[in-house]
Amino acid sequence: MKPLPEIRLMPTRLALDARPLERRVGLIILATDHTSEPDFRRMVASERIGVYVARIPYKNPTTPENLRKMQPELAAGAALILPDETLDAICYSCTSASVVIGDAEIEEAIQSAKPGVSVVTPPMAGVRGLKALGAKKISILTPYTVETSRPMATYFAERGFEIASFSCLGLEDDREMARIAPASIVELARKATHAEADALFVSCTALRGALAVAGMEQAIGRPVVTSNQASAWNCLRLCGDETSRPELGRLMTLPLPRD
């Protein structure tokens, strides 16, 4: 072997950028999640916005009891995302757990690790999206069981929506939910949307619903809001990105409404 060259320490004084990327979005997802990360990479991440992911423990089946067990993990998950650095937003990417635990409790847990950060949950983003679209009477489609779907109906009713119809698929494993083809979700949307509904909300961050939004909107002739699409839209707007992207659904053409 030839002698190694001398390693030279360059005396250059470097000028460092304030951040590698201008904006930063944290994403807390379930250990079993197949969908949220690729959806956020496709819809949120860019040369300007970074998406930083932490996974927290979760075990199926998707029941209210199992979903509630994630609450103690939220602060630890948030703390793992760029420790000691600020974020522009953090999304806890589980719709059903957010409904069961509660938006305020989730915000408190995450902000205990990241003080002052804007916290987004999928049902919260869904409500904002439906209001931005002017929807008052809605249909809801979930992949869950009736037991897990019931708190979802209460959540939207308590926030002023009239629920024209509510359909669920009876699945208990989020990994199976992720395997439903986007084309099948379009057909399910067609069957689940009530004739008098202003819009359709498709719940669950495991579903590949964001990939099917354009097809669903064409099929039912009205706006569609899905968990990951709404969360992505909410995070983009919090990062100051107002770009209109109609290929991702009508919601992605709108500003974030003022609460």
Image (cartoon, rainbow, N blue to C red):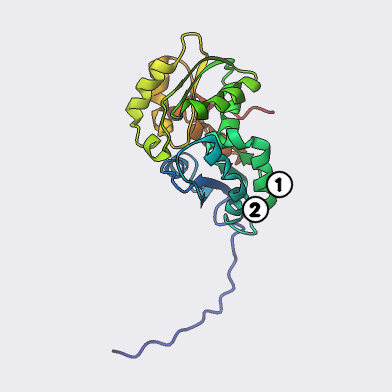
- x%, y% of residue 184? 33, 26
Locate residue 104, reporting x and y percent: 68, 37
**Up-down: is 257 above or below 239?**
above
Label annotation for residue 47: none
- Crowdedness near tag 2: few (<14), some (14–19) or many (≥20) residues, C-alpha within 10 Å: some
> Among all residues in the image, which is located at the extreme top?
196
The answer for how far apart the CA atoms under marks 1 and 2 are is 9 Å
Question: In this picture, is 255 found above or below 10?
Answer: above
Q: Can see residue 93? A: no
Front residue of 129/146: it is 146
What residue is shown at x 43% (from left), y 87% (from top)? Answer: 6
Residue at the spot 44% in from the left edge and 46% down from the top edge: 32
Q: What residue type is labelled 1?
A: Gly
Kindly state the secondary structure of the residue where label 1 is placed: loop
Residue 83 vs 8, above or below: the answer is above
Q: What residue is drawn where x is 54% and y is 46%? A: 27
Q: Nearer the viewer, residue 167 or 79?
A: 167
Q: In which quarter of the image is the N terminus?
A: bottom left
Report how many numbered discs are placed on residues in the image: 2
Is 249 in front, or is 53?
Answer: 53
From the top left corner, tell me how far across and down residue 137 is, in percent: 56, 14
Q: Which is nearer the N-term, disc 1 or disc 2?
A: 2
Q: Do the residues labelled 1 and 2 touch (CB within 8 Å)?
A: yes
Amino acid carrying mark 2 in the image: Thr
Q: Quadrant of the C terminus?
A: top right
Residue with the mark numbered 2: 86
Where disc 2 sits, the SS reads loop
Residue 139: image location, x then y, percent: 50, 17
Task: State left or right for residue 109 relative to residue 189.
Answer: right
Q: Is residue 19 above or below residue 197?
A: below
Residue designated by label 1: 116
Tell whether 173 sits left or right of 137: left
